Image (tube, helix red, strand yellow):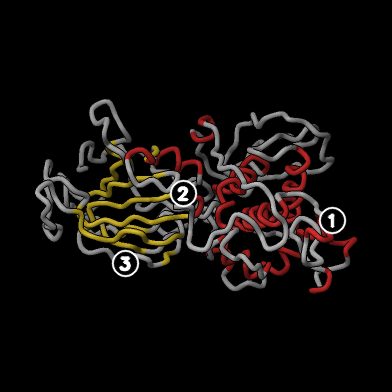
Amino acid sequence: MTGLPGATPRTRRVKRPAVLAVTLTAALALLCCTGGTGTLLLTELGSESDTPVTNSLGCGGGNIVNVNGNLPRIGPYGPTKIRNAAIIIKVGKEMSIPPRGWVIAVATAIQESSLSNLPHLGSRNDHDSVGLFQQRPSQGWGTPAQLQDPAYTSRKFYEKLKKVPGWEKRTLTDAAQRVQISAFPDAYAKHEPIATQIVNALANGAARVTIDRNDGACAADNGKIASSGWTAPIPGGVGSGFRTASRPSHQGVDIAAPKGTLIRAAASGRVIVSRCDPDQYGRETCNVDGHPGKGGCGWFVDILHANSIITRYCHMVRKPRVDKNDMVQAGQVIGEVGSSGNSSGPHLHFEVHLRGDRSKHGATNPAPFMRERGAPLIRGSGARRNAGR
C-alpha cells in the first residue's frame, strides 16, 4: 500500500524526487506541555547552514528555535527551503491563521515546489505557474513578479484558504485542493507528516496545539483535533504498553475505559478492515465478552491514513459503525469500547503500523507516535495493566 486512494508522487507540473518520510527525534517525542500558539522569531532570516534541529520543542509556547542566524536542515530540506517554510508560517501568524493552516500551507508548498521558489519552467511546465505554490498569473493570483515573492504568494494562499467553509477540520488534501484546484488532488496528504515536523520545529510545537485552542497542546482527545490532524482515539491512560518485558509480542497499547466509551478515528483516512476477528478456534464470537486466551481482536477496525500509516482499534463491544472502504474524518466515531476477543475487561487495544504493513513487522509504539502529533496517550495510574490482546 502506498497511501490513500489516488495518491500520486508528483504534481501536474513539475517532476521531482519523492519526499522522504521522517519522524521527530526521540527527544522531541518525550515533550508534552500546554500553551498557546507560540511566538515566532522569523525576522532577519539568516545564512545557509546544515545545522540539524537541536532545540527543545514545546507545545506552542515558550522558547523556540533561534532562526535569526543559521537555519536548520529538517529532514530532506536544507536551509534555503526551510527559510521559505519559515516565511509561510510567519505570514500565517501575521494573518492570525491558526497553526492547522500553517501545516496545510507548508504541505501544499512541498507538493507544488518542494519548498523551492520556482520560476517559470518553460517546456518543463505546461502552465504559467511560478513560485512556492505554483500559482498561475493567468488565473488571477498575481503578476509573475509578485508570485516570486514568498510572502506575497503565501498571503494569497491563506486568503483563499480562509474562504473554504470549515477548512480547519477538513482533511489536508481537501482543504489544499479547494485552494489549489490541482490535477492530482490526493497528492497533498502524504506530505502532512513532514509539514507537521517543520511547523513544530520552527514554531515551538505549534502543530501539537488543538484546532479549537481551548485546551492548549497535548490535549487532543474527546473529538478535539491537533493541528497535526491527529486526535487520541479515547480519553484515558495506557495500561499495558508496547512490547513490554512481560508481553514482548504485544504490538499495541491498552487503554482502559468503561464499556460503551466512544472510539474515534485517530486521523482521517480510509477503512480497510471492519469485521469480527475469529478466536483461536476460527469461530466468530464477537457479540459476547471475551476472556484471556480466547484469541482474536474481537470486533475491530483498521484505517489507512496518509503516508501509509495504519491504525488499529480492537475489542469493540459491537459491530463497528464504519464499513470497509468508508472514508472517515479525524475524530469521527467508529465504534464503542468493549471486551470482545482476547480480553480480560473493557478497554481499547490500539496499534499503529508504518509502511502500510499490517503485520507485526510494521508495528510501532503508539505512545511516542501519538505524542509527537499532539494527541498523547497519557499513562493512567489506574488503568488496567494486562487487559486483553
- Distance between the Cα atoms at labels 1 and 2? 42 Å
Q: Earlier in the sequence, mark 1 or mark 2?
A: 1
Three-letter amino acid code of the residue under disc 1: Pro
Q: Earlier in the sequence, mark 1 or mark 3?
A: 1
Q: Residue 59: which numbered mark, if any?
A: none
Which residue in the protein does label 3 denote? Answer: 323
Image location (x, y in percent) of residue 248: 27, 30
Assign a secondary structure to mark 1: loop
Which residue in the protein does label 1 denote? Answer: 119
- Distance between the Cα atoms at labels 2 and 3? 28 Å
- Work out whether 16 lies above or below 30: below
Image location (x, y in percent) of residue 281: 9, 49
Residue at 78% over, 61% down: 125
Q: Out of 73 and 164, give the one closest to the viewer.
A: 73
Three-letter amino acid code of the residue under disc 3: Asp
Q: Residue furthest top?
A: 245
Which residue in the protein does label 2 denote? Answer: 219
Assign a secondary structure to mark 3: loop
User: In the figure, residue 334 lies in which quadrant?
Assistant: bottom left
Q: Out of 197 and 117, give the one closest to the viewer.
A: 117
Total number of numbered discs in the rendering: 3
The answer to whether mark 1 and mark 2 are in CB contact below 8 A is no
* Comparing labels 2 and 3, the label whose residue is closer to the camera: 3
Image location (x, y in percent) of residue 204: 63, 41
Residue at 31% over, 52% down: 313
The answer to whether mark 2 and mark 3 are in CB contact below 8 A is no
Q: Quadrant of the C terminus?
A: top left
